[in-house]
Image: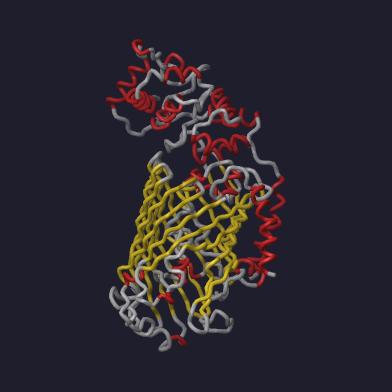
Amino acid sequence: MKITKIALFGMISLLPLQVIAAGSAEDLARQWCANCHTADGNSSSPLFPRLAGQQAGYIVKQLQALKNHSRSDESAHDYMWGIAATLDDKTIADIAEYFSSQKPLPNTAAVEPGLATQGAQLFRNGNEAKGTPPCMACHGPNGEGSEVGPRLAGQHAAYVEKQLHVFASTQRPSAVEMQAIVKTLDDKEIQALAAYIQALH
Amino acid sequence: MKKLYRLAYLSVLYPLLMLIFQQQAFALPSYARQTGEACVACHVSFPELTPYGRLFKLSGYTLGTTQLFPVAAMAVASVSKVSNTQGNDSSYPRNNQLQLEGGSLFIAGKLGDHAGMFSQWTYNNLNSTTQADGSTAFNGKTTVDNNDWRLSWHLAKADLDLIYGLTLNNNPTVQDVWNSTPAFGYPYQSSRLASVWGIGPQATLIEGGLAQQVAGLSAYAFLNKNWYAEIGSYRVADGPFSFLSHGVDLSNRLSGNNPYLRFAYNRDWGMHSLAVGVFGMDAKVHADGTDTNSPLDHYHDRGIDMQYQYLSDPHIFTTQLSYIHESTDWDASHIGNDRATANSKLNSFRAKASYWYQHTYGLSIGYFGEHGTTDWTAWSNTGSPDTTGYILELNYMIKPNWRVGLQYTGYTKYQGASLNYDGNGRNARDNSTTYLYTWIAF
């Protein structure tokens, strides 16, 4: 069977092509990161955070933390440690630039309206009695993020909720402020905030 | 002397393997070492793939970093118990005894930016041969298992995402990324002893009949992570392709080139992943697998399949359905010999649903049903191949790469009848099998 033989020969002769360097950071983002975060960073599955429009500095900081294993929550370990390990500083900066420049789309997943209203209250005003500062102080009035806090608007509620619980542990040691703040929140408030944040855009 | 060799071999191999595997182990561990990701990134439970696992496979196993030793292994130990031996224990050797089933060595990983492989080699400790006196003898045997060698490319632009490539493999559907097609379909683990005892559902040719008997090359494309198309051709795995059937007796020897087609629509949204597809193959098979001049039987297998996965943390629910219609044109030499009619049909339906909690506790329920043309020559007791049954399985993951399973396969109809299907008073439910197994990959 000639065709099969030719194809097999072709396959084998192509193997040395591996020395050709991998493409740009944008190619990497579209070919690998995109598998979970989607190419435009507006991931559909709440298992994976949305990256579109995220503060570039924050993405860099997280990829570095994933690379040096200082961020050690379960998903970080299961999905990201290995990937981050393959990225050099330049690639990390370029990937961060790529995702931060993607347009964030509204997250259309359903949230409980009552929950979101309660979350809005906390997000904007905090809760002085319990020592909860307003989220918008660092994350911006529309959750767009700032120099000191990542973008939250449109992030999957399930992801926000999970990470707020992670902050209560020691698995994200660089998030010093959040470790203190999360102690002032109960589970219901965490759910409310997550719902509000997901609906924000 | 042979034993000495084996001992010497193991004493060198074992420490070497320990050296290679001293990193934390996952499943398929060599891929995990390559990507640095955990099993759960690609698998719901081995071998069922997540959306990311599907893209990893379609990308030709090329994501990550090339490993010096892209090697992994797995081993299985189990106890199988048939429901009723009818006092004839010698027909059910090793029944209800702890068995080391054997294991597999995988050479699996990225070879280059556009080439990757999955090559499984299996040591079957329960390879059986029937002796002259009718008893069963067991001996270990190493044979090739599933192989899938790929070349792939990925065009990823703002308005176009196209993964395309070639696969060279030795089992139709082994290259497929949805677990609703036969090669990686449910049950993911089944008793080797049950097949030694001759117990099993009926199967169409594409449901394992050509596994490790053929070499196939196909071209595939996955457009915008929605549309999948594949066209390929299979031939007998001999000559330069004999490594793809190494150690396996060619019982279904293909003649010439045999086309394979696959189309599927896939959609991932939120926590959901859905795929519906069709697949088909036409196969010309020699009536005598050892004789290349023997006449040909023509198989036409057409399948339709569906998979749905709900993937959240901590709850995962997945289900697969497939329906395969097979029409076979038998060569005239069969008629009156082992077939009554020149054409027969066999329809195979499979369904399975699983629930997993925290990737640790699993429950699966499966159904299988095969219905075929009435044929009193092929099925002299009942005139029918019809077999139906169900599978119940409980799983516990001791570690992400170490599973234990308790599986019960219950037959409600066997080769045409629920009661007395063999004319000697054996009932379908007598074949029901309880299977307790432990599976470890490293």
Which quadrant holds residue B364? Answer: bottom left
Residue B233: x and y in percent read 55, 66
Numbered disc total: 0
Q: Is residue B185 above or below residue B234?
A: above
Q: What residue lies at 43% left-to-right and 88% top-to-bottom?
A: B337
Q: Is residue B152 left or right of residue A139?
A: right
Which quadrant holds residue B419? Answer: bottom left
Residue B5: x and y in percent read 69, 65
Observer-nearest of B45 and A23: B45
Screen quadrant of the N terminus of chain B? bottom right
Q: Is residue A151 above or below residue B387?
A: above
Query: Can the viewer see residue B194?
Result: yes
Query: Can the viewer see residue B150?
Result: no
How was this image coloured? secondary structure
Observer-nearest of B342 and A105: B342
Q: Residue furthest top?
A: A128
Q: Residue furthest bottom?
A: B336
Residue A108: x and y in percent read 36, 33
Q: What residue lies at 66% left-to-right and 58% top-to-bottom?
A: B10
Q: Is residue A3 above or below residue B132?
A: above
Residue A18: x and y in percent read 69, 48
Observer-nearest of B91 and B427: B91
Q: Is residue A55 above or below residue B125?
A: above
Observer-nearest of A195 and A4: A195
Q: What residue lies at 63% left-to-right and 44% top-to-bottom?
A: B22
